[in-house]
Amino acid sequence: MHEFGFVFAGFFVGLVVGLTGVGGGSLMTPLLIFFFGIKPYLAVGTDLLFAAFTKSGGTLSLARQRLVPWRVVGLLCAGSIPASLLTLTVLHRIGPASPSAQALMTNTLGVALLLTAAAMFYKAVRGKQAPRSLAQADLAQATRARHWSLPVLFGALLGTLVTLTSVGAGAVGVTVLLILFPRLPLPRIVAADIAYAVPLTLVAGLGHASLGSVDWPLLAKLLVGSLPGIWIGSRLVNRTPERLIRSILSVLLAWAGTKLVLI
């Protein structure tokens, strides 16, 4: 029964990621911990590689639709990859299964989920809607931040958060992108968020694998469901009821974050 549950969980999370750019770690990690009883350090490590493979499928679909702003992706990766490697070095020294590392991951995960929920709820209720399309002549200007260092800096913060918790590349990443690139159309925001997360989660996931923090059979079951899920979601990204989905997700993530913080 658990095998089918893992496949279904993978499909559901993949679908949501494809639709909104949100939901990889912020949904899958709490699902693994609370509903399947997976230990936090294994949930984080497995989910990072799950996100890498799942979002690779989504990135391929979005790249074929020419929606990925590669300049934005490159700036975020310039900050997130070095930060991820530094965080992995710290985890290697203290040991991912040690009580101190488990407490750090659990508490940081809870705070990350609450931040994600707050960012999603604000965007759904009060945030300005990003444009759905943009003239090609204006696209180059829309991919330029006020200063080149800002995406790199935020990328570094996200790299640290994602490596510790597997959470942050989705909703927090989308919110950061909306602030830094307000003129960028929403489908391109989602595409950038999914694409930059691929190298980040791959580096972080392989780092966790070297620490023994990945459950490989579990990963395979999740991917069986997620790859078709994110493909379907990314094909429907232009027709998603954004406010409704984000509002529902923000409530779920707030519940999961509160439960983790109070453990």
Image (cartoon, rainbow, N blue to C red):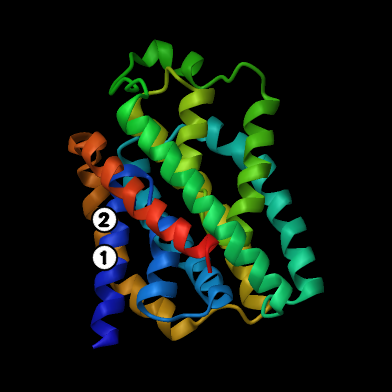
Is residue 33 visible in the rendered image? The answer is yes
Q: What residue type is labelled 1?
A: Phe
| CB-based contact (under 8 Å), mark 1 and mark 2 | yes
Circle 2 Cα neighbour tier, 10 Å, few/some/many (<14 / 14–19 / ≥20): many
The residue lying at 54 percent from left, 38 percent from top is 73
Q: In which quarter of the image is residue 219?
A: bottom left
The residue lying at 33 percent from left, 13 percent from top is 135
Q: Name the residue under label 1.
A: 11
Q: Name the residue under label 2.
A: 15
Count the labels in the image: 2
As measured in the structure, the alpha-carbon distance from the residue carrying label 1 to the one carrying label 2 is: 6 Å
Along the viewing direction, whichever of 128 and 46 lies nearer the viewer? 128
Is 37 situated left or right of 246 in this image?
A: right
Circle 1 Cα neighbour tier, 10 Å, few/some/many (<14 / 14–19 / ≥20): many
Q: Position of residue 156 (x, y in %)?
A: 68, 43
Q: What residue type is labelled 2?
A: Leu
Is residue 25 visible in the rendered image? The answer is no
Q: Position of residue 13 (x, y in %)?
A: 31, 60
The furthest residue to the bottom: 1
Q: Is mark 2 on a helix, strand or loop?
A: helix
Is 102 situated left or right of 72 in this image?
A: right
Q: Is mark 1 on a helix, strand or loop?
A: helix
Q: Quadrant of the N terminus?
A: bottom left
Along the viewing direction, whichever of 101 and 196 lies nearer the viewer? 101
